[in-house]
Amino acid sequence: PDRQGAAQSSDPRSRSENPNMTVSIEQIGEVAVVTVDNPPVNALSQAVRQGLLDAVEALDADPFVKAVVLTCAGRTFIAGADVGEFGKPPTPPHLPDLVARIERAKKPWVAAIHGSALGGGFEVALGCRFRVATASASVGLPEVRLGLVPGAGGTVRLPRLAGVETAVDMVTAGAPIGARTACEAGLVDTVIEDDLVAGAVTFARTVLDRPLPDALRDRSVAASSAGFWDAAAGSVAARAKREEAPLRALACVRRAAEADFETAIAFERETFLALRGSAQAAALRHVFFAERAATRPPELAGVIPRTIGSAAVIGGGTMGAGIAAALRDAGLPVVLVERDDGAVERGLANLRAIFDGAAKRGRMSADAAAERMAGVIGTTDYAALADIDLVVEAVFEDLDVKREVFRRLAAACRAEAVLATNTSYLDPERIAEGISRPDRFLGLHFFSPAQVMKLLEIVPTKATSPDVIAAGFALARILNKIPVRAGICDGFIGNRILKVTRVQAERLLLSGATPAAVDAAMRAFGLPMGPFEAQDLGGLDIAAFQRKAARARGEKSFAPIADRLCAARRFGQKSGGGWYDYEPGDRTPRPSDVVAAIIAEEAKSWLRRDWHDDSIVDCILWPMVNEGARILADGTALRVSDIDLVKIHGYGFPRWRGGPMHYAQAYGLDKVVDALDALASEGLADPPCDLLIAAARHGGFADPSR
Ligand code: NAI
């Protein structure tokens, strides 16, 4: 039950302390209820901070008030800082002072939490003497996700309340926890099942009869076990890789455990201020805003999406099974259509393997896995699709096969059903040719593994109606994915840039680098895998097939070494060798003499250069940025930040680098243009495109989302 009823409670003696009512006070007997009302998420704006500070002063001075309940109007407790104030100089009153003032209040404050108490919101709650919460509430300190540490005592008060282990987990990973877990961990005093404010007022009355616990500032941190900090440093470093904030957050908790309160607070503040100006924090802020912009495209404002309450997937292979799993994870019933009974069985087995794997890794219970499968119907019969809201086609990448599928779908499905293709490289306009009601058709391009990767490219045709495009975005929300609208071109946004990456990777080999050196450089930059390891994992045959198709269309396609590898049937891990050799049953890539010999032959007419990590990264990254600029120039992407999201959520580009376009802007586009000119003069890249040159001249890409 979410909170309600402050206004209806008995004995109201309403005394607004704040003319704009951002923070109001009402008295229920000897308990004052302070309500923050700053829609949509009660962010800690300057007005909220001032209103709360005024409230503490007023209530301390009021002899009738014995205890205070702090609650929020609307859908959530204070969900964090005011994003509008991000990156700007802070204005008083400052949050740490407010939290300290609440903590020193003469009357006990009880935070009554519903929705989420996150970041500064949770720090305010930690300033209160007690915390109560609805069962559906969650609390957390997600600052590391923005490249920061908590800045208002979170790392210092949390270990005093819940011990170092809980504090380290919460602060270094940034994941919120639910109210019941929080209650078990001592973060929340009680979970309130009924009306939150009424329950909190009752709770406040009961605590008045008991001696008050110490404020957190006056408590000490329970001693940790021997070796705790070393173990924590090891696991946090392994998880964070090159991200700074998690280790800095760990250092703050450690200082909180080892130093006195004021010293630890000062250390946390210093860390917070140092990180706030860091490149990583700027990159992570950029991604945060990019995600917000992507999920609420202004061009669809006011469009009501078609309803999606049920789904079907055509094709139960790698992608179809993953997409079906994602749909089931979101609770949608799924019909899985395959071409014959044997393929239905294989498709269902693929899907079962996904859920069983998740259960084995502890990501879901065995019951949940069974429940997921129970919501799937496998069939070859299109009649099962008559009432379905959304169909995603994931059959072979073959125009004729896909056209035939859509011809049948158009006849079998309702006129309002959304019909989507997951094609990677085919032209959706051509797939949809000739179907009835083409307004219901669009591309929904998932990334492998589809139940994991967050990116969803949404690719409308000229005929797609706005409510169908909006349904694509609504689907992304249901599936907890990041939607990016892409125009039609070869590879849309993501794979179009991927092709450039691959060309650059081969150019590097032809001019003297080795696959292992290129992969190591890209990993050192922060990618989970280098381009050659990634191709060996995914298989070289798919791209070879694309190149063949492109050449058949009369287009050029540069991959002299990959072509030779495919001719030698070196398709990657699955064929025992690709860019690397593999021992049977072992995925460790080993440098290959065969590949080295092929490279040497192909490189005969190329000049050799000495490559090092930085120059390798430049040779791959700046051409990606150049392609991104072309994608922007021809309208394939609507926003430059969308290109960053595609690389982050579809290809594992490090979030803390902000995506390639942000990274290039932060580095300096003029320097990127110079670097591309230099590479182009050696035949190692295309020259910078006009839009990139113009953006360099104007100091950045124009971004309508800002
Ligand atoms: P796959 O070969 O693993 O699966 C294709 C499935 O479609 C097979 O199970 C096959 O039996 C079934 N199928 C073929 N014709 C059919 C028909 N007429 N009716 C019903 N089922 C039929 O292929 P994969 O990798 O799943 O790719 C499927 C689509 O997804 C392709 O268009 C591909 O380009 C695209 N895609 C693939 C990605 C990947 O990483 N593999 C990533 C994103 C998109």
Image (cartoon, rainbow, N blue to C red):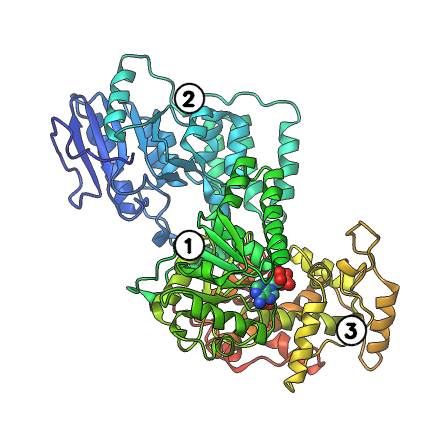
Instruction: For marks 3 and 1, give the CA distance.
Output: 45 Å
Instruction: For marks 1 and 2, give the CA distance.
Output: 55 Å
Residue 486 spot, x, y in % from top left: 47, 70
Q: Is residue 222 left or right of residue 413?
A: right
Q: Which residue is mark 1?
A: 310
Residue 574 spot, x, y in % from top left: 76, 58
- Tag 2: amino acid: Asp
- Tag 3: amino acid: Ile
Crowding near pointer 1: few (<14 within 10 Å), some, many (20+)?
some
Marks 3 & 1, CB-CB < 8 Å contact: no
Please say whether residue 541 is visible from this viewpoint.
yes
Dividing the image into 4 quarters, which one contains the C terminus? bottom left
User: Could you tell me which secondary element the residue under label 3 belongs to?
Assistant: helix
Dividing the image into 4 quarters, which one contains the N terminus? top left
Closer to viewer: mark 1 or mark 2: 1
Mark 1 or mark 2: which comes first in sequence? Answer: 2
User: Could you tell me which secondary element the residue under label 1 belongs to?
Assistant: loop
Closer to viewer: mark 2 or mark 3: 3
- Residue under the point 26% across and 43% down: 74
Mark 3 or mark 1: which comes first in sequence? Answer: 1
Please say whether residue 492 is visible from this viewpoint.
no
Crowding near pointer 2: few (<14 within 10 Å), some, many (20+)?
few
Q: Which residue is mark 2?
A: 218
Task: Classify residue 217 by image quadrant.
Answer: top left
Residue 535 spot, x, y in % from top left: 70, 63
* Extreme-bottom residue of the structure: 554
Q: Which residue is mark 3?
A: 561
Instruction: For marks 2 and 3, give the CA distance.
Output: 67 Å
Q: Nearer the viewer, residue 586 or 602?
A: 586
